[in-house]
Amino acid sequence: MKLIIRSLVCIIYSFLVLSPVILAQPSGGPYGPVQQDYELPKITGSIYYASPDGKTDANGKTVNNPTTIEEAFSKVKNGDAIILRGGIYRTGNLILNQGITIQPFGDEKPVLKGTRVAADWKNQGNGLWTTHWDYLFPSKPDDWWQRNREGKKTPLYKFNNDMVFANGKFLQAKGWEGEVDENSYYIDYDKKLVYIGVNPKDKLIEITAYNSALIRTTKDLNGSKSDGKGPVIKGITFAQYAYRALEIEGKDPEGLSPEAEHGKEVTGTILENCEISFCSRVAGYLRGDKMTIKNCKVSDTSTEGIYIIGSSDVLLEKNIFTRNNIEEITGYYPAAVKIFNQCYRVTCNDNLIINLPASNGIWYDVGNVDGVFTNNWVENVGSICETPNYDQPWPSQNGFFFEISKGAVCAGNLFINCDHGVWALNSCNVKFYNNTFINSMAVIARNGRSAAGDHFGWHPSTGPDVNERNGHVFVNNLLYAEGNFNRPLLFLQQPDSMCDKISGQQLKQIDNNVYINNSDKPSSIIVWSPAEVTNCRQFLNNPAEINKIYKEFSANSKALFNYTAPLFKSTLLHNFKLLADFAEVAASEPPAEIKKLAGSTMHYIGAYPVGN
């Protein structure tokens, strides 16, 4: 009898605790790589074993006779696998054109590094040390970078792709040796000399020697044509590459492009439990439909972390994206993830997007269609200290940024201390349901930008036309500001110069939202445009004021000031479940499409249901 009871208890425990509970909210993890003990993959081809000390003449067919990683890459065909033993592989510029699997052996930890060790240093006698270095990567800004605007803030040497590390610490570049200290370096490219200000004795000094780790090319290679299949890469760490760690080649549309004409060259790439860090440009330029990036960590990159281009049906889930734009380059519009140039149905679900003071979070940029941004935890993107510019919300850093694109669902997300939690710009039909904003503005804006005379040429032609930037929905959201947050909670922006031309509202629906400020003297919580007032902009203190002007809007929303009654379970512990005593506003039941994408009934306010 006791055995039966114990079995029943275990079954109930497994159901209540271990079974996934699907709710429209961030799951709490695990985010990023999860340590695995990998079994050998079940494949149709051959397995090649490689190790850092493998022999070039070894066939690599057994675990005790490993070859080099370079040799393994030269042999693999469709359906093969490369099994990497643990340790550091100082290698790069590996190329393949076949659908293969790359993973660790068991629970070992292979690390691919794009640096070599610099051991031969000369003491200059003035607090600096130099070494000769042949593997240099000088570069220039892209031609669209506006030097007349940004050159005073970003010196040109920051666009070089070299990186230097002292005991794993990233050193910042300087423009001449007189600026170098223990945290920086300078390169004389004419003489191929690297200067550092930290004594290299008994230290590991690493300098970039490879442009990339792995390129999946679409070209012929080793006598074989591309098989059109992306690699499966699991459990690998990539670090310290001069340009990018990974690239999946494919078509970059250079104008309006039907979905059927891009994203098809390489499909089905999988990145899982990988870590990519310290790449001087991006962690990866990735192209191709049906791509999955799951439980990866991408950090300490420069202009972007992950860059997805012209791809459809892509999933990013349970990843960590953090610390992008570590060189603080301006005028390059950085983002931890950029989804660029006519991607369709890219889903970012349940990711941790955190600590990006000089970068956007996830940016759907130019011509995206039907994006899905659900259940993500977004924190500390940009700064909340600066006074917003009401004439234009740019420059800014945005947790979720949807620009010049058509149709998105943004639901069940948590935004904490972000410059802009969300920003829909020059887009249409973005549906914001059940998000929680903590000291983070929600921004929806449009302006007169068009393809005629635009700095980026054809880009605006991929999104809705100027008079089609509307249809947004903002329902069941919880917007909370602490007393020192001197910003609006909701900002609808349109230039005054456009108000005579476009007077229709940007929103199709706005209701069942709660605006809370725990100060007794808050600033205006809503900035509304277009409006028939001076400057085409109204500052409102209550959603009831919206309803007075537009009877179809905000009849069931509420504002609460100087609010100290029950709200969250614990802001100190970042537990943002609503307390059962908080029932100020009834929620509206979202459409079936929203509930299906976010994974919940969502019949409550904000991202989290009432806690117990």
Image (spheres, rainbow, N blue to C red):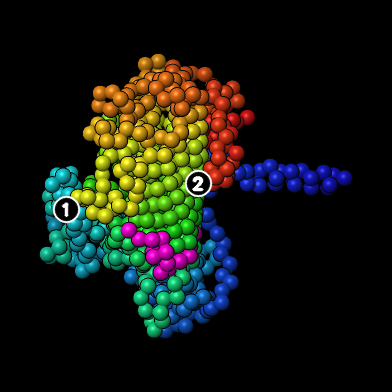
Q: Residue at point 13% right, 57% down?
A: 124
Residue where numbered disc 1 is placed: 156
Counting every numbered tag in the picture gives 2
Q: Quadrant of the N terminus?
A: top right
The magenta region covers 256-272
**Secondary-structure class at tag 1:** helix
For residue 271: magenta?
A: yes
Residue where numbered disc 2 is placed: 350
For residue 420: magenta?
A: no
Q: Residue 35: which disc?
A: none
Category of crowding for the residue at label 2, using alpha-carbon neighbours closer than 10 angstroms: few (below 14), some (14–19), many (at least 20): many
Q: Give how far across and how far down residue 178 sits, in percent.
A: 12, 50
- Residue 515 quadrant: top left
Q: Residue at point 43% right, 31% down?
A: 438
Q: Is residue 505 left or right of residue 348?
A: left
Question: Residue 126 versus residue 463: which sits nearer the camera?
Answer: 463
Q: Give how far across and how far down residue 205 sits, in percent.
A: 28, 59
**Residue 482 in view in this figure:** no
Question: Residue 133 versus residue 604: which sits nearer the camera?
Answer: 604
- Residue 530 quadrant: top left
- Does the magenta stretch mainly form a helix, a strand or a loop? loop
Between discs 1 and 2, the one toward the N terminus: 1
**Residue 103 in view in this figure:** yes
